[in-house]
Image (tube, coloured by chain):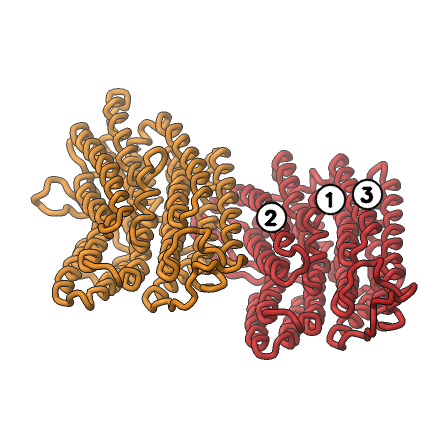
Amino acid sequence: MIFINPIYDILIFSGLIPIITALLGLLLGRRYEKYLGLIGFIGYVTILFYLFQPDVWSIDLSIPLSPFIGSSRLSITSFTKFFIIVFALLALPAYLESIDYMEEDRNLTSYYTLIGTMMFGLIGLTFSDDLFTFFVFWEAMAISSYVLVGFRYHLDEPVEAAVKYLVISGVGSLLLLLGISYTYGLVGVLTLDEVLSFLATVNPGNVIYPILLISSLFLIGFGVKAAYFPLWTWLPDAHPAAPSPISALLSGIVIKAGILGLAKFALPFFLELSNIYYPIYLVITISTLLIANMMALLQDDIKRLLAFSSIVNIGFILIGFSIAVKGSVDIGLASAFSHILTHALGKGAAFLAVGGILYVTHTRSIKKLEGLGRVYPGLSMVLMLALFSLGGLPPLPGFWSKWLLILSAVDAGEWLLAFLGVFNSVLAILYYLWLFQRLFLSQPSEDIKRDVDIPPFLGSALLIITIFLIAFGLFPNLIYEPAFRAAKYLSNLLSGAF
Amino acid sequence: MIILLSLYTLIIGGFLSYVIGARYGSKAGYVSAGTIFIVYILLNQMYLASGGNYIESLTWANVPGLITLNLLFRIDGIAYAFISIILIVTLFSAIYSVGYMDHAENVKVYFLAYMLYTAAMIGAVASYNLLQFFFFWEAMLIPSYFMIAEWGYGDRRRVAFKYFLYTQLGSILLIVAIGILGLYTLNRYGSISFDVNILYTFIGELPLNIQRLLLILMLFGFGVKMAIVPLHGWLPEAHAEAPTPISVILSGVMIEIGLYGLIRYTLPFTYSIWSSEGSITLLLILALITLFYGGLMALVQKDVKRLLAYSSISQMGYMFLGLAAANVISLEGSIMHVYSHGLLKALLFMVAGVLIHVIGIRNLDQLGGLASRMPITAVTAVVGAMGIAGLPGIAAFISEFLIFGGVYNISLTNKILFTVIAVLGTAISAAYMTIFIRKIFFGRLPENIGEIHEVPTSMLAPMVALAILAILIGIYPTPILNPILSGLSEYFNLFGGV
């Protein structure tokens, strides 16, 4: 059933979620406002169902946003659909878990409104077909995420982390805006197809410096959000400091917005100067993988460990992206996109499980969590399942994407990247096994309270994400097909232009 | 769907045992044994009805242009021999567990893990898709790791972790080899596939350096599980410290699956390298080293189970010798030896388990004279020991004879030398087996061993049954030799071996 057209339907619907949340929050008052999370949950379930209707699923549409705003365009393609699926899949359990996890906090109306706005920004990003619209949604997403990190403003850690995040990410956005304005100066319009046809017709020798400038600005601007080497400094502070459902959203999908931007808008510029940017991305990928993995192994704070692991996984995604920059757009992006999906599931599950663990133990120190598996086997199993998926143990989702990443690296002749991929996976699995032993085989420490019940919404959030993990692991088609279609769409677009 | 159904039956049987085990303790072993028996009848009938070649196929993941995976199972004569010995050993070991595990904690989880372990082994052998094989291969590791770590003896956690590490490092090499084959399918057929019938189209076409690489990777990958010297480090400890019914399975059937992997996935692809004079000499020497190292180490062991563990290494040397010679006679001997060694080693480990269960002493020097107190155990032990020593009339004689015949059959100048050395190895087997029998069952009964009697029937019956089976197969081996021969003749047609 299509109301206006799929783009407006989904956009308006996800835009209505924060508005309805805010209005209902005024009516409900302090006592019931925690149930506002259900609105977002139902909303994103509806969006997923709407998206999977045959007539919406098969549609491929591009429309001007409105007659007033210059050349703004929105489009719904397999690329859009893939990212909506990733974003919505993780939003469901995050909304559900918030209901129990945040019950003792105040200002929950603004909390849920902010999540709604952030999700609206993310959904908008997927539709944007021009850099101007993209930037508007980008800022909607970014600003609400700054506030969400610092949501518990009475504590020191979140505020410090939020300010750091705001400053660094703000500078990143500014550089991105600068890049966009240079693009406007160079091309004259900002829609993707115009940019592509400009790049296809122009003689690269004439515009090499403008293109170099623009793509460097994009590399930094998107890179701050994607948090790769050396622009990641804000992430290990911001992600642990946020409430756990927000950490799940930030690590699972918000940093992927950077990759989305890179793949859709920056890749054409990189491809134009492939011989310069391929080595740069090679260095970035290798440094990200190695340094972040070393850092992850040193952490005692479990959320900080997961935050560093997010950076490592961005490194994995960059393996695919580097190969795309080298020229094999097709398989490079397919593997990168598969990893975006599986990492969103795995890291989302890990942060949600840690949320559950924090709820019952109030500690993030791995030392104090020893023996947790003997007291709370369910919670610990979800955490371990998520970690094993992140490490790439078959038959969990992480295996399928890491495997494809490594294969595509070998296919492109990049043995170094393939070796690093294997090496880092092995390191991660060994580390997670060691963690597994500490969690399950040690004697429970005194700090773990034994009589806390897992509340219903938190439990069902974990159940949902576990089902996702297992289903996507057993049926790899669910990962490969949307990812491959999205990659195919972009590579067709690019091959049409070059 | 019969193989898939069998796997489900085994898993459901595991959960059934869990439920029964929660109420009736180790009696749940009868449920496990019953399930395994049903599966045995089912698979046996299916194999006979299909005339020796049963295939089933299901689509697993299919993204054109990227990946084509089918869930493929196939049972030919070779797989049939492995499957029937796996099911026989696990069946008797499950009955044996009823008596052996009666005082253990958490028996219900033990039987669940036991059945998952069985299902994984059957799945690995029946798989006809390399990636799927790898999944089951990995799935074998997890339950066995837990069973050693939870119900083992001595320093069981460290031993289990060592076992895990060794096997996992081997698996990494395997997955690299699998990836190389997958990339070949990508380049030729335009999508990645691991179906063995597709992979077999590359036989004889792979460049020699790729063949060499594959041979090295897979030899190390499978060799860790087979405990070929120098990759055997995990085996003596793991087999000695595992709970006895699990030692039975580890030594009796699991390590042999490494041999199956080499037969199915390595020899066909690398035959031109394998059969060159240099490689075959090297492989034969490796097998002889394993054979003698295991035998000599077994001679000097004081611990009953360690002696048997080293004896397993030595017997793996025989099987590897037959495989290294790579002709129909020697391979027939190898696979037959898997069968007979499975029966005999299972029997001997059960005898060792009786000592641990009844007397609690594992040291050979502190035992003696038990034949008068445990006549039935003593008789079965003598059958097992003489079988391993290669006495005619008991199963292993035929298989060793075939292996020696096969080694003599290769076209190598030093073949007589190799055959003579290999035959000399049986003298060592006879020596350590005689020591085993004499020190436990004959001589003077130590004074600290008080009133002891035969073990309960549930432990005695499996031992008697295995002894009778070993003698029956020793006298009339045709029911096993025929399927193996028919499987092998088809197998050698694949790559033109002799």
Indicate the colour of chain A. Answer: orange
Dot 1: element:
loop
Q: Which mark is residue B426?
A: none
Labels 1, 2: front one:
2
Letter of the chain that mark 1 sits on in the rendering = B
Residue where numbered disc 3 is placed: B410
The one of B239 and A468 positioned closer to us in this rendering: B239
The residues bearing labels 1 and 2 have C-alpha atoms spaced at a distance of: 17 Å
User: Which chain is painted in red?
Assistant: B
> Badge 2 local density, few (<14 within 10 Å), some, or many (20+)?
some
Q: Are marks 2 and 3 in contact (CB under 8 Å)?
A: no
Letter of the chain that mark 2 sits on in the rendering = B
Residue where numbered disc 1 is placed: B229
- Residue A256's image quarter? top left
Residue where numbered disc 2 is placed: B165
Dot 2: element:
helix
Judge if badges 1 and 2 mark residues of a common chain. yes
In primary-sequence order, the first of circles 1 and 2 is: 2
- Locate residue A402 relative to residue A35 in the image: left or right: right
The residues bearing labels 3 and 1 have C-alpha atoms spaced at a distance of: 23 Å
- Locate residue B415 relative to residue A261 in the image: left or right: right
Q: Are marks 1 and 2 in contact (CB under 8 Å)?
A: no
In primary-sequence order, the first of circles 3 and 1 is: 1
Which image quadrant: the N terminus of chain B? bottom right
> Badge 3 local density, few (<14 within 10 Å), some, or many (20+)?
some
Coordinates of residue A46 in the picture (x, y in percent): 25, 63
> Badge 1 local density, few (<14 within 10 Å), some, or many (20+)?
many
Please name the residue shown 34% across and 40% down the image.
A491
Note whether residue A480 is visible: no
Three-letter residue code for mark 3 = Ile
